[in-house]
Amino acid sequence: MFEQTFKNIDDIFRKDAGCSSELDYTEQSSWMLFLKYLDDLEHEKSLEAELMGEEYQYILDDKHRWGTWAAPKGAKGDFDHNNALTGDDLMDYVDGELFPYLKAFKQRAESPNTIEYKIGEIFGEIKNKIQSGYSLRDALEKVDELRFRSQEEKHELSHLYETKIKNMGNAGRNGGEYYTPRPLIRAMIDVTQPKIGETIYDGAAGSAGFLCEAFDYLRQGGRKKKQLSTSDLKTLQENTFYAKEKKSLAYVIAIMNMILHGIEAPNVIHTNTLGENLQDITPSNQHDVILANPPFGGKERKEVQQNFPIKTGETAFLFLQHFIKMLKPGGRAAVVIKNTFLSNSDAAALRKELLENCNLHTVLDCPAKTFLGAGVKTVVLFFTKGEPTQKVWFYQLDPGRSLGKTNPLNDNDLKEFIELQKSFDDSDQSWLLNVSGLDQSSWDLSVKNPNAEEEVVLREPKVIIEEIIALDKESEAILGKVQELL
């Protein structure tokens, strides 16, 4: 129902000079979707208050509510074009009045965990990039067609928003940082098995895909599909999911994505996670479960590196140190990292730290192009904090095809991994490695499948004959030159 509306909104952005890519389309639709969502939420809460005989205190004042400026309605509930701002008048209002008003909520909010604070953060970070007031008017009217008033509508909108994030990742630039394949996330959640009452953390949130999938997993009762109580649902909403994100656009998208999945006031903080000194992390900051895919290949400044005992410029290696410290004793983690972490000499000290202080029980070796648009080979590290590693179970994922945009990773590809991992079974694709046998200077954990047969390539007779003839000609040429010298 809403899919065509989303396409129409993108078409409007595509024709506007201020928007040049999928990143811009997602950013601009995000702030409009947020305000439409907020309007529907306030409408719902005002009806609830009316039924209780109470007066509802609106978050936004009347002048700046969606129904006043974005989508004014006539007496019959139809769109009132006579009172709708458009052209330069609309641009002046949005840029000069609306955004400054919304940005100021951050200072007025009681705490960072309130929706008021999130309003202030979002509109302090994001800007209206649309240059034509007529394009903006068209986009607002399309967004007004969307409804957030039932669980089915929210579910459909969250699915469409996820598609936008995926397209943004495919579009390149920084978009790929915001999108981890959902089948891989679901497999990571299935192995770590978070439970109601535990806290889940992602310090490199991107679009918050890990937290949204974990929310869906827990809301459906986890692996056992247990029915949730009202108390469980409250815990899930308020005291379960925690995230940090450095980039402004990703931060806004993370909040919008979590809201669309049903988390009303997401605990997402806009900050550079690596700017926090590890020594300042206390038990009260730690979490039960960590699910993350930190950025690959980034480099951090010297002053940031000083926050970590193991000095490295590689962003992902700093994040791994952060995640180990952020885990509670007995806490579980699943972290995506470049496969060079397993063997590179500059990660030896970090591998030693991980193996001695955590049980690195599972390594999932992912095939090339698992991450669309990125040729980087990755592994997923699954570990529990507080006990040294004795054995590591490796699984070499092989979907039996080359992955790509038209043929991405799917849930079925990961079924065998999830099943075998429960008992760390041996197979053609899986094996156990004894840590006691490792070289204790390098702590090399390279993926070397002992069950894989060496592939013998038999060449065609024609190819062999051609090679013999070529070699004979080379020999003749060499002998000729030798004879000339003699």
Image (spheres, rainbow, N blue to C red):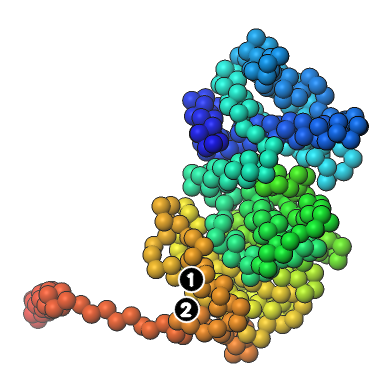
The quarter of the picture where residue 47 lies is top right
Residue in the foreground of this view, choosing between 56 and 308? 56
Look at 55% across and 83% down and name the residue there: 425
Amino acid type of the residue that numbered disc 2 sits on in the rendered structure: Gln
Residue in the foreground of this view, choosing between 449 and 322? 449
Q: Mark 1 highlights which residue?
A: 397
Look at 33% across and 80% down and name the residue there: 455
Look at 72% across and 33% down and name the residue there: 40
Q: Is residue 14 above or below residue 204?
A: above
- Residue 273 placement (x, y as % from top left): 73, 54
Q: Residue furthest bottom?
A: 437
Residue in the foreground of this view, choosing between 329 and 47? 47
Residue 429: mark: 2
- Residue 441 placement (x, y as % from top left): 62, 83
The reply to whether residue 318 is in sight is no
What whole-number distance in Å separates the C-alpha atoms at marks 1 and 2?
Answer: 7 Å
The reply to whether residue 151 is in sight is yes
Q: Are marks 1 and 2 in contact (CB under 8 Å)?
A: yes
- Residue 38 placement (x, y as % from top left): 74, 34
